[in-house]
Image (cartoon, coloured by chain):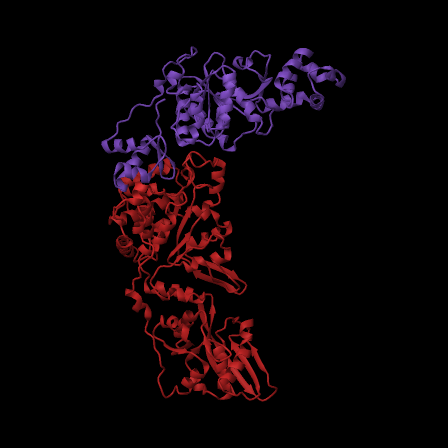
Chain colours: A red, B purple
Amino acid sequence: MYSIVSTASVCGIESVLVQVEADVCDGMPVFEMVGELSNEVKEAKERIRVAIRNTGIRLSPKRITINLYPAELRKSGTGFDLPIALAVLAAYGHISSKSLEDIVFAGEISLNGDIHPIDGVLPMTIAAKEAGKKCICIPKANDKEAGMVGNIQILPAENLQQLIQILQNRNNCKVPVNYHNNIEETESKKEENRYDFQQIRGQKVLKRVCEIAAAGRHNLLMLGPPGGGKTAAARAIPGILPELSGEEALELAKIYSVSGMFGKREENFRKRPFCHPHHTISVAGMAGGGKVPKPGEISLAHNGVLFLDEMTEFQKAALEVLRQPLEEGRIHLVRNQGTYSYPADIMLVAAMNPCNCGYYPNRNKCTCTPAMIRRHLQKISRPLLDRIDLCVEVQKPGILELTGKGKEESSREISMRIKEVQRLQDMRYEKSNIRYNSRIPGEQIENFCPMEKEAQAMLAEAFESLELSVRGYYKVIRVARTIADLEGKEKISSSHIAESLMYRNIDGKGWTGSDV
Amino acid sequence: MYKRWLGGISGISAAKKIALEEQVGGAKEIYYMNKSKLEKIKFLTQNECEILEQYQKKNPKEEQEKQIEKGISFVSFRQEEYPSRLRNIYQAPYGLFYRGRLPEKDKCAVAIVGARVCSEYGRNVAKQIGYVLGKMEVELISGMAAGIDGAAQWGALRAQGKTYGILGCGVDVCYPKQNQDLYERIPQSGGIISEYCPKTTPRPIFFPNRNRIISGMADIVLIVEARKKSGSLITADFALEQGKEIYAVPGRVGDKLSEGTNRLIQQGAGIFTSVQEMLQNVKKLTVQDGNAAKKTGKTLEKLERLVYSCVDLTPRSLETLMENTGLPLGELITILNTLREMGCISEVYKNYFVRTEIEV
């Protein structure tokens, strides 16, 4: 007899539907599987045979042929166990083919028939919904993930035996579970951030720059001696960013779903991700790696913060892969199977010491020679630096600030202002495809950044005297735009430009002044 | 031609070269001496004879032409143009290779030396002193090194003064590399000078030797910043030996970069307070008043004055300035920007500011 069951295969962060066909006929008792299968899929036949026997069903010795199509697509992952098992059972006549219609199945089966969680349930559910399927059957442990999609019935399966019973009774009873879109539910859930700007004493300049960076989603570089509070500030940044929108949250959840890290997002879907890879990270770890690449840190930090602590210690290659994503907001990985494109729209926050010992320009502590400092700074390439909008020097706070009784502003207060800026940005960019000030393309600067006459004059003067690059020039305007937004001003004035110039990137001579 | 050849020989001390020339009668004679004759000269060791023999295989004419093509001149000990101040020092160099010109005999010359790794304060002081000296038409001698040396020489160049860089390598080698600009600018008015044969690459041993020329060429030696153990202190030792006046720029107690200079003062060096005072005993001055060099005072507004008063000679960070002035960040930044545009302060390092004007 012949049967057919729908399942889904994950490709990158998208998913395509795959059909599993089974045919059982008289002949030598063999279990044959075809259809461009990877090793773990081929192993499925052993698991299935044992699992079916352990659920108490005896399969008479017949020739079983399984085909997965489309045949040109490489199938990998363990999610095919369940559909193959059901196809076999249907072909033997233990379940009616009709009861499998309109359901997409995915899940890994263990020898005793338990159904184990798999990666990529979220994109699978989306694919099933888009293909017009009514229901998706996934392992019980993955039900929250599937539940994010909404408007599709979800059948969580715990073990094979129970699932067979449900399917056999399908015509009589309704499908048992139907989750609501649980993104909506978590909207109000506000988790207390462990890192709050309130805990950072003093450091007014640093806080101000963090606020500007977060408001306009500008990339930020912090320079300073060890122990100055760079890391603490970076960790507090996600707390002042506005929450993810539903669409953004879903996109991010997809990335985490295929990486098998969905659990990390489960508590709070709306939270901005914060990734802080250790500096020993490889290129593959940063960009995404594998035959079918798993998303790297830049994709896991999508719509959130990628924090590179001790930026000079990273492998050069691991840093240079950031160039394209920082421009484009996506990363394209080419493998012999095809090109995979992952979202990677990040806010880069980097921290580094100004020299090997970390104390420059305090010449009482630092004995690094100019050549040493230059070599230290050259570890970061110019093109990468060019993509960073804001740069701030962080000083160690004095004892007076540490012990001071003054109340520091909390992240909540800062985030209120940032929300307001976001509202202004949303209004301004309603008709264009950008969302943040930092993403204004060069040709539209004049449109979006009207300036007062004095501001223009000051900028022209600075362009000459500070030897700004063209890219640097635009950056100054973009940052000034955000500063003006923070004040709620439509036109950029000279004080906004002055402040923006103060935080301009270390380009040209500004890098280390006259010494190096 | 042969003098140039003799001057280019490394491995034989300057004193021996001078003595040898005196005994044999001239550099040409040395070039044509055979081995047996060389060995008869008592003060030459076996090794030195061999070196001479090696050099005798070279073609002095060809070398000379090559050097002249590159604009490298040579002056030897016996020649009229040889700097008179240098002639009288212990271990005076046999000859000098130079690009540009040599210091003028009847003009006052001051040597400024100091740490390569210096503070912004030191750099500023050196630059300012160089500037004032340049305006007073005092010649500035230094080592063209990174840090203090280079800063002082830039200051002199800015004032259209003459400055001379004494190198520890061949005059056609730019060391350190980052001073390429300076290396090209100096010979336009002053000169690049070295006792080493062109093409010689810098070696640590050359620099202390070079220092004796720096101090030897000057009337006054000024040390701006030096750590406890510093090459600049070697220059000071030479200056003492050579009987030159020594001045040191005093520093705060506890500043590592001033330990050397403060120690010098303790040992009797003059305390540098102003250029005028330093030069008071010098008779050869052409322009008496360095005040001509001072910039015209600018009028600052009240808040600008407040901010300016908080900006120090040592770099102050934005954070510190904010605390000291008590101004809100936006306002402070606008004022700093104005002051920077006026040239009163400069940003020496990311968000660190320093005064640019020091009265010296």
Q: Position of residue A131 (x, y in %)?
A: 41, 75
- Above or below, A511 relative to B113: below
**Residue located 49% across and 58% down the image:** A285
Q: Position of residue A307 (x, y in %)?
A: 41, 53
Where residue A324 appears, x then y in whole percent? 45, 53
Give percent across and percent down for residue A510.
Answer: 40, 38
Answer left or right for A199 relative to A471: left
Report whether B43 appears left or right of A187.
Answer: right
Q: Is residue A33 visible?
A: yes
Residue A100 visible in rendering: no
Q: Is residue A401 above or below residue B128?
A: below
Camera-nearest residue between B61 and A389? A389
Furthest residue in direction left, as rendered: B302
Q: Residue furthest right?
A: B36
| Number of dots carrying numbers | 0
Q: In which quadrant of the rendered view does residue A435 lie?
A: bottom left
Using the image as rendered, state which of residue A36 and residue A404 is in the foreground. A404
Q: Quadrant of the C terminus of chain A?
A: top left
State the image quarter where residue A161 is shown.
bottom left
Q: Residue at x 55, y 23 (%)?
A: B210
Horizontal placement of A319 versus A184: left or right? right
Q: Residue A201, relative to residue B136: is it above or below?
A: below
Residue nearest the viewer, comparing A190 with A255 = A190
